[in-house]
Image: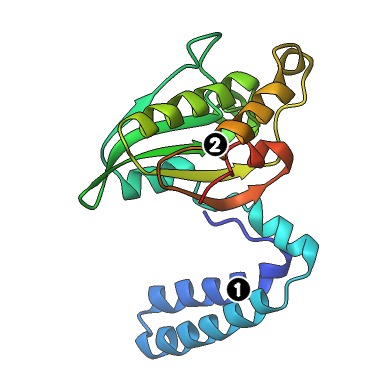
Amino acid sequence: MANYLDFEKPIKQIDEDITAAKIRGDEDAVEILNKNLEKEISKVYKNLNEYQRLQLARHPDRPYAIDYIRALLQDARELHGDRAFRDDPSIVCYLGIMGNRKIAVIAEQKGRGTKNKLKRNFGMPHPEGYRKALRVAKLAEKFNLPILFLIDTPGAYPGLGAEERGQSEAIARNLYELSDLKTPTIAVVIGEGGSGGALAIGVAD
């Protein structure tokens, strides 16, 4: 079931009309409605204000990092842990093949559904997540693998435990180390990119 934001109500109505026309078997109506839908989508998304853009960045139906990874990578292998404290599920790291090239993907994952959102901490990484990201980035550099960073976070986790374990230091360390990384890097914001939570894996070519 699709989720519609308030400003997407005209799109929702046309979608419902298309569904009804398909049930009736009215192909002519479906064709006309599909054209109307294209026009309405163009109209709605061309005139968004700042708050609506933020809502869209946080849209529950957006693809998340793992959705992209599954679509892009063959023979994907996930790497876990920062080798110091624990694995942070809000940052995922994969090695795999894209096209005919081996690459590393480092991404922030929000999670779907209450249980998974809690597991992924709503996409807000702890310091061990950033240290995991740096560990994998250094591994990719060692083997001359290009890195794709996928950014999607409201920000780094601001909790007491994260601060005690060096949240600001972990972010600063990543900024410093990634700025001098000697392998090709690309960073893409796939949802929202808030604060140091995004910067910590956002230093790229």
Across and down, in percent, residue 198 comes to 64, 41
Mark closer to the observer (1, 2): 2
Q: Mark 1 to mark 2: distance in Å?
A: 42 Å
Across and down, in percent, residue 52 comes to 74, 63
Q: Answer yes or no: is residue 17 visible.
A: yes
Q: Residue at x 66, y 68 (%)?
A: 8
Q: Which residue is drawn at 65% across and 55% down?
A: 57
Is 98 located above or below residue 155 in the figure?
below
Q: What residue type is labelled 1?
A: Ile
At label 1, counting other C-alpha atoms closer than 10 Å, the crowd grade (few under 14, some 14-19, many 20 or more) is: some
Is 65 located above or below residue 177 in the figure?
below
Residue 18 falls left or right of residue 14: left
Residue to which mark 2 is pinned: 178
Across and down, in percent, residue 147 comes to 41, 42
Across and down, in percent, residue 121 comes to 63, 27
Nearest the eye: 22 or 43: 43
Residue 168 falls left or right of residue 115: right
Q: What element carries label 2?
A: helix
Q: Which amino acid does label 2 sit on?
A: Leu
Residue to which mark 1 is pinned: 11
Nearest the eye: 139 or 36: 139
Looking at the image, tell me whether mark 1 or mark 2 is earlier in sequence order: 1
Q: Answer yes or no: is residue 61 visible.
A: no
Residue 146 falls left or right of residue 39: left
Is 149 located above or below residue 53 in the figure?
above
Q: Which residue is drawn at 66% across and 59% down?
A: 56
Label of residue 173 in the image = none
Q: Quadrant of residue 123?
A: top right
Q: What element carries label 1?
A: helix
Q: Are marks 1 and 2 in contact (CB under 8 Å)?
A: no
